[in-house]
C-alpha cells in the first residue's frame, strides 16, 4: 500500500483521504534506524548550510493538540548541531504582537541565512484557531490565505525553503494521548481546559485545517500530510522530508582562499 504525502496544488484536500495510521509496512525498529540515518545526513547538510550562509530553511509544524509537534522537534534537534537551528514556538499573540499585522511576529522569527528554523505552530494559527474561535471576522481570515501565499513567496524568492508538515492524527488517537497526559504527572502541565474544549471543536478544526492546507498548498511551498498516529513513523517521514529538501538545496562550503596557507607562521 502506498499513500502520497502531497496533493497537487489547486486540488481540494480532504483529511479523511489520508490514513493517520499509515506506516508503509515498516516496523518500529527499522523506522527508528532509518530516522537515525536521515538525522546523521541532516547534521552534515545543516553544517554546510550554516557554512554557506546564503539560504535558510523553515520546518513548519502544524497539527491539532497532541499531534506530536514537541516530539518532532526533539527528534530533529537530537540530530542537528544547535548552532544550526532556530526553534520558535508561537503562542496566543501578546498585546504588542496584536498591535501589528499577523505576519509581523512570524517575519521576525524567520531564521537568518545559514539556519534551519523550526516553527512549533506558525502563521497558520491565524487561519485555523483564529477562525474556529472566531477571534477575527470571516472576511479577515479569508483574506489571509492570499496574504500567506504572497508572504511565503517573498521569503522563498529570498532564498528560504519552507518544509510545511501537517501532523495528522485521528480523533481516537487524540483521546488516548489526552488521557495519557491527564494521568502522567510529567505531562499534566501541558494540558489546560482549552485543550479539552478544542477537542469538542474537532470538526471545526478539521474543516479549518482542510481549507488552510488547500488554499496554501503552493508549488513553491507545498504542504506535506504526515501520518502521525505512530510517533516513530511520523519521525521517519519528517526526518526524510527535511533531509530531502536540504539535499535539493545542496549547500556548498565557501571557496577556500589558499593564499591563507602561506600566511600561517
Ligand atoms: P501550546 O502549543 O500547547 O503551547 O499552545 C499554544 C496555544 O496558543 C494554542 O492553543 C494555540 O492555538 C494558541 N495560538 C497560537 N497562535 C495563535 C494565534 N495567532 N491566535 C490565537 N491563538 C494562538
Ligand atoms: Mg496545547
Image (tube, rainbow, N blue to C red):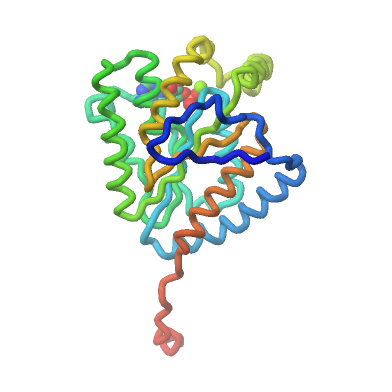
The quadrant where ligand 1 appears is top left
**Residue at x-position 49% and y-position 14%:** 203
| Residue 246 position (above or below residue 8) | below
Evaluate whether residue 92 shows in this view. no
| Residue 10 position (above or below residue 38) | above
Work out whether residue 259 or residue 139 is closer to the camera in this orientation and state it: 139
**Residue at x-position 57% and y-position 38%:** 72
**Residue at x-position 66% and y-position 34%:** 22
Question: Residue 17 placed where, x, y %?
Answer: 55, 28
Question: Residue 129 placed where, x, y %?
Answer: 40, 20
> What is the count of numbered marks?
0
| Residue 150 position (above or below residue 194) | below
Q: In which quadrant is the N terminus drawn?
A: top right
| Residue 59 position (above or below residue 51) | above
Q: Is residue 179 left or right of residue 152?
A: right
For residue 104, what is the image quadrant? top left
**Residue at x-position 64% and y-position 17%:** 172
Question: Residue 248 placed where, x, y %?
Answer: 48, 59
Outermost residue toward the bottom?
A: 262
Work out whether residue 156 or residue 211 is closer to the camera in this orientation and state it: 211
Work out whether residue 190 or residue 69 is closer to the camera in this orientation and state it: 69
Q: Is residue 236 left or right of residue 144?
A: right
Evaluate whether residue 101 shows in this view. yes
Q: Is residue 183 left or right of residue 133?
A: right
Question: Residue 61 placed where, x, y %?
Answer: 48, 36
Amino acid at each position: 500500500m502506498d499513500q502520497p504525502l502531497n496533493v497537487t496544488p489547486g486540488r481540494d484536500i480532504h483529511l479523511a483521504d489520508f490514513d493517520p495510521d499509515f506506516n508503509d509496512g515498516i516496523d518500529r525498529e527499522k523506522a527508528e534506524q532509518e530516522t537515525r540515518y536521515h538525522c546523521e545526513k541532516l547534521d552534515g547538510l545543516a553544517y554546510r548550510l550554516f557554512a554557506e550562509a546564503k539560504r535558510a530553511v523553515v520546518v513548519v509544524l502544524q497539527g491539532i493538540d497532541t499531534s506530536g509537534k514537541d516530539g518532532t522537534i526533539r527528534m530533529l534537534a537530537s540530530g542537528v548541531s544547535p548552532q544550526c537551528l532556530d526553534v520558535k514556538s508561537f503562542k496566543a499573540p501578546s498585546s504588542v504582537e496584536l498591535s501589528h499585522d499577523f505576519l509581523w511576529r512570524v517575519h521576525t522569527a524567520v531564521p537568518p541565512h545559514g539556519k534551519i528554523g523550526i516553527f512549533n505552530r506558525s502563521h497558520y494559527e491565524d487561519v485555523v484557531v483564529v477562525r474556529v474561535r472566531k477571534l477575527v471576522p470571516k472576511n479577515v481570515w479569508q483574506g489571509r490565505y492570499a496574504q500567506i501565499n504572497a508572504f511565503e513567496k517573498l521569503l522563498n524568492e529570498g532564498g528560504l525553503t519552507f518544509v510545511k508538515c501537517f501532523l495528522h492524527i485521528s480523533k481516537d488517537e487524540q483521546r488516548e494521548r489526552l488521557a495519557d497526559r491527564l494521568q502522567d504527572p510529567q505531562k499534566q502541565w501541558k494540558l489546560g481546559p482549552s485543550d479539552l474544549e478544542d477537542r469538542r471543536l474537532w470538526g471545526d478544526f478539521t474543516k479549518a485545517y482542510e481549507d488552510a492546507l488547500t488554499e496554501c498548498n503552493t508549488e513553491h511551498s507545498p504542504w506535506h500530510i504526515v501520518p502521525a498516529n505512530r510517533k516513530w513513523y511520523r519521525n521517519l517521514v519528517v526526518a526524510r522530508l527535511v533531509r530531502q529538501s536540504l539535499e535539493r538545496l545542496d549547500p556548498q562550503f565557501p571557496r577556500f582562499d589558499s593564499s591563507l596557507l602561506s600566511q600561517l607562521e
